[in-house]
Amino acid sequence: MAGSTTAERPVKAEGRRPGRASGDRSAITSSGKRNYLGGAFGWLWLAIIIIPIYWIVITSFKSASGYFSGNAMAPPTAPTLDNYRLVIESGFVRYFANSVIVTLGAVVPAVLFSFMAAFAIIRGGGRFLKGVNAVFLMGLAIPLQATIIPVFLIIIKLSLYDSLLALILPSIAFALPLTILILGNFIRDVPNELFESMRLDGSSEWGTMWRLAFPLTKPAIVTVSIYQALQVWNSFLLPLVLTQSPDLRVLPLALFSFQGQYSVNIPAVLASVLLTTVPILVLYIAGRRQLLSGLTAGFSK
Amino acid sequence: MGAVTPSATGRKTGSLSWLVLPALVMFVGFGIIPLIGVVVLSFTNWDGIGAITAAGFANWGSVLTDPGLPHALGVTFLVMFLSWAVQTPLSILLGVFISGHQKYRAVLAVLYFLPLLLSSAAIAIAYKALLDPNFGLGAGLGLPFLSQNWLGRPALAMGVVIFIVSWQFIPFHSLIYQGGVRQIPRSMYEAAEIDGAGRVRQFFSMTLPQLKNTIITSSTLMIVGSLTFFDLIFVLTGGGPSDATRVLALDMYLRGFRGSLMGPASVIATILVLIGLALALLLQRLGGRGGASSQLEGA
């Protein structure tokens, strides 16, 4: 592993730098020959990705009657915002707020706890921390949705059934294994000399964690935070099982019941699909470099 | 370990252990205890509301002899295999493509990621409408072969599930492969060039073997992930038509929360956990000692 560890360094360093690497390390394309197969497939895949999204967008601006009369792939002849108005009037502001509360309430503690745990696992040693690490690694291999029935029972026993906290607590737990793994990989890359010099300066491990490890792993922290926010924001099974009041619906669940209610009004259903994605899209546009390069580095180790 | 190794700070280990406690408490409470709980509940009767009573091996007996189990297992493994077999080559191809540093490829990579922003529920809802034989894609593009009763026929519904899974997750895996490809030293390609190896030859004799660990990481995520395709299938087909897409996770939900049979549902859940663990161990084995095992252990 030692050899490949050094080979990994540059890639991760690149992940750290939002400025993006220049083309000089390009392995494949340096040959001068063109990768026609890859190129053709790259554009084909773009079409496969974009056509359904294009259709969702244009249809969401069509009137219900326009949807059934016009060509599905043609833009609306008389664009309308009625569908969006219907969605917003159906309580989506409330559902949106619920989703924000659950997402922030789960991701902030999950990433914070993971960072502290990853720091302890990497910097500490001994049987206890090794054992803890093994437990989290096992968590990676287990489809955690399979534990939904006992989670349901525990939530009932804690008198949390049908509350937003019921969604937050398991979401934190489900996010931990992967977040700890990724943050651990990044903390491990902080040069040991830096830790040594902090120690010689008389810094406590607690101080070292916040003043050295935290700033140096910040890009990774942003990446995993966005990634986990995406997971929690889009989670469906937990809210389906752990809540029942219409007031407590989070967006994916609200979408599901909305499409049940308005199954014939396809444009309105698609407007609801798009509206639930807007905040994530904004987050993605703001953090896309970070997210893409961070995920690449985090998973390719 | 000597005093000069990184674990020299081991002297202070005692003072670090408490840092794992918040994470550990949460994970034990909502991860480990439920994991044990699912096995315990598989030996009980519970309707989800009333009292929980002991059932011995009755649930196991009834589930293991239920013809629904081999069917759901078969569907689960079929989804697992097909989604892996479709996604892996396409993700590698796309990953190699976006590993180039050209500007337009970076732009494409950003666009590829869009489906990952949508929830599985949203994607399922949108595709249900898009695949409508009368008003959807086929009618819009004027391509009759796209106007099929996609979700009404068992084989087609399975195909649709695999397609949508690929649509949603190939971008993510191609990112992983992009990272893997960029780690391959450029000098290896230069050497191959001098030896006169063509592009195809380079791909198969260098790129692919160098990507071994990446393939294992990506495959592990795909395969364990395929056990949890609940949202998509639940919203898209509800397991139909005629149970053609009733995977284990859905079977568990329907038995437990729709059928109020938490005991048998817990049997299914236990089987799911065992399959997940077995597959993860198997894949780590494949990776050898220097491979995925140490990747996962971070050694």
Image: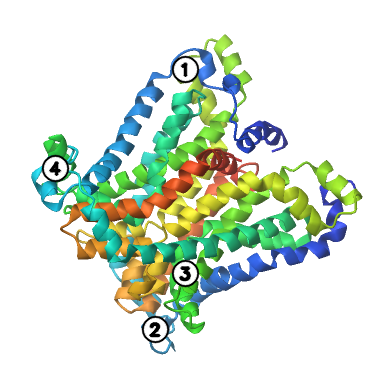
Chain designation of label 3: A
How many other residues sit within 10 Å of disc 1, few (<14), some (14-19) or many (≥20)?
Answer: some
Mark seen at residue B257: none
Q: Nearer the viewer, mark 1 or mark 4?
A: 4
- Disc 1 from disc 4: Cα separation: 39 Å
- Disc 3 from disc 2: Cα separation: 22 Å
Q: Residue at x 30, y 71 (%)?
A: B66
Tag 4 and tag 2 share a subunit: yes
Mark seen at residue B46: 2
Label 1 sits on residue: B199
Front in this rendered view, residue A178 or B123: B123
Does dot 2 land on a helix, a strand or a loop? loop
Front in this rendered view, residue A40 or A253: A253
Residue A186, position as x, y percentages in the image: 67, 45
Q: Residue at x 57, y 70 (%)?
A: B32
Label 4 sits on residue: B147
Quarter of the image with the N terminus of chain A in it:
top right
How many other residues sit within 10 Å of disc 2, few (<14), some (14-19) or many (≥20)?
Answer: many
Name the kind of residue labelled 2 in the image.
Answer: Trp
Q: Residue at x 45, y 19 (%)?
A: B200
- Judged left or right of residue A29, residue B13 is right
Does dot 1 land on a helix, a strand or a loop? helix
- Disc 2 from disc 1: Cα separation: 61 Å
How many other residues sit within 10 Å of disc 4, few (<14), some (14-19) or many (≥20)?
Answer: some
Residue B206, position as x, y percentages in the image: 54, 24
Q: Nearer the viewer, mark 4 or mark 2?
A: 4
Name the kind of residue labelled 3 in the image.
Answer: Leu
Does dot 4 land on a helix, a strand or a loop? loop
- Disc 3 from disc 4: Cα separation: 40 Å
